[in-house]
Image: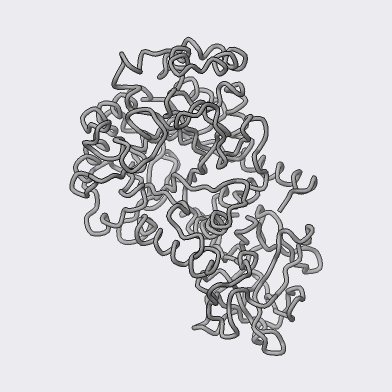
Amino acid sequence: MKLGSSQTSILLSFVFLIFVTLCHSWPLSTSNRWIVDDKTGSRLKLTCVNWPGHVHVMIPEGLQKKPLNQIAANITSMGFNCVRLTYAIYMLTRPDEYGNLTVAQSLEQWNLNNATRDMKIYNPEMLDLKLIDAQKAVVDALHKENIMVVLDNHVSLPQWCCSFDDGNGFFGDKYFHPEEWVQGLTTVAQHYKGHPAVIGMSMRNEIRGPRENEEDWYKHMKEGAEAIHGANPDLLVLVSGLSYDTNLSFVKEKPLDVDLGNKLVYEAHWYSFGDSDDDWKNQPNVMCNTVTDKFQNLSGGFIISGEKPYPLFLSEFGADQGFQNEKDNKYITCLMAYVADKDLDWALWTLQGSYLVREGQIDTDETYGMFDSDWQNLRNPDMQVRLQLIKQTIQDPHSKVPEYNILYHPLSGQCIQVGGGGKLFVSYCNYSTRWSYIGDGGGNGSPIGLFGTSYCLNAVGEGLPVRLSNDCKSERSLWKPVSGSNLHFAAKDGRGKTLCLDWDPDSSSNSTVYTQQCLCMDDDLNDVPNCGDNPQKQWFKLVKSNMK
């Protein structure tokens, strides 16, 4: 899917609409599963991008590529309202080796002469700052753009993260001493006390390794959370789980025993790492269901429901923005459907187009980055479109608007709308058409109605456009979610043939919604293994909303 000039213009207008809603009132708190403005109680959704500053040099990436104020302004223009800014504990706890270094000295010890030369051009005032002061300068620049900051302790020893046995993974590892870690967290919390940009601290990124165990997790996460809260009670405290932040299942039976008032948030990560390439290729419907269930029941999706819900922050997800990786492309589409449905707070990996040093290599490319390797342009403008619905606040617990549905196409990030003359088309999700849907009708399906009217969607025939009709009782109007993914919507046409909603974003900018044969399913709507088709274009999600 490539953007035309008119689409780009619409997108820029839409990003501006997001921009004008970015203002927030510090500090933030929690109310059940929501993050809220502490003063008004209204929901404030975090839509963040990660910006690493934890790697060897210990400064946020890209300051040798572009002026700091331009990077901050670009983050705003992309529609993010928040940055998850990473750092290394040793920067705070080991002054002789790390903390007292200036930016220039840190660059020099890695022989980054070209980077030093370029920083003199783009950010010369940064070179003589100590590392913690350089970090604060970045936070201040973000604050000027009204961007919120979550400070994330990524590692103790500054290095690329995260290997299973790199000594940075679990309490008591070579570089992960619990007392020193608590000292560092306390120092950071105190350093930013009263700073209106810093709204939260994430205690530790991707806990892992051969020594990980639940007993030590409970002990030390409680210590770290209480240290942050004691030093700076205004901050949200973000708690990560085990196994690279993919396992919080143990807190179902034994919640973390810590009293932070209304400041506790859990966080989770979701990537395609470890998924089978063949499974995503051959059984994408089944695989989407498998990974969604895993995130819901193991990684922490359950946190937002139950007797005592908490907010869940999806603090890392992402994919190669070349979108040439089949597994990544199908995973991110599946994830988008889930994130929109649950309206999670989130942080995309990642902002940077390159690294000063990564794993011994200088000026390395980051294919997951929003920027290209020169930090001059977006790596893939289509990513902006794919994110545009989940950047919006979809649900608000205090809204008085009657609940309705948005009909979302997660492959493109766009929504089914109704235009003049009742024509259906796919476009950006701002001012989305409202739909009603009562469920699958006990397996028989039910109408997808135009909210507040007597009209509904009708399946006319294979290869034909879907239409609006006041015939909402015949089988052609009874839609039900099918396939392992539950992301296909099927109904029967006038001849009794079962068809699925379909829209191909690569169809020469044709925005018409059709019905076609259901991909990767047999005539009985069972999933077909080793399917040669790509069913993503038929994936749709009815997302509940109550926003104006």
Q: Nearer the viewer, residue 312 or 183?
A: 183
Tell me which residue sits at (49%, 45%) in the image: 45
In the orientation shown, which residue stands out farthest toward the bottom? 495
Compared across the picture, whether 198 is left or right of 282 comes to: left
Q: Nearer the viewer, residue 147 or 184?
A: 184
Using the image, determine if residue 331 lies above or below residue 192: below
Using the image, determine if residue 226 lies above or below residue 106: below
Q: Position of residue 515 (x, y in %)?
A: 70, 75
Residue 238 can be seen in this image: yes
In the orientation shown, which residue stands out farthest toward the front? 360
Tell me which residue sits at (60%, 23%) in the image: 65
What scheme was used to colour the molecule?
Answer: one colour
Q: Nearer the viewer, residue 223 or 343?
A: 223
Residue 398 can be seen in this image: no
Q: Position of residue 399 (x, y in %)?
A: 51, 54
Compared across the picture, whether 73 is left or right of 318 comes to: right
Compared across the picture, whether 409 is left or right of 28 comes to: right
Q: Nearer the viewer, residue 22 or 294?
A: 294
Q: Position of residue 518 (x, y in %)?
A: 63, 76
Tell me which residue sits at (25%, 46%) in the image: 210
Q: Position of residue 475 (x, y in %)?
A: 64, 86
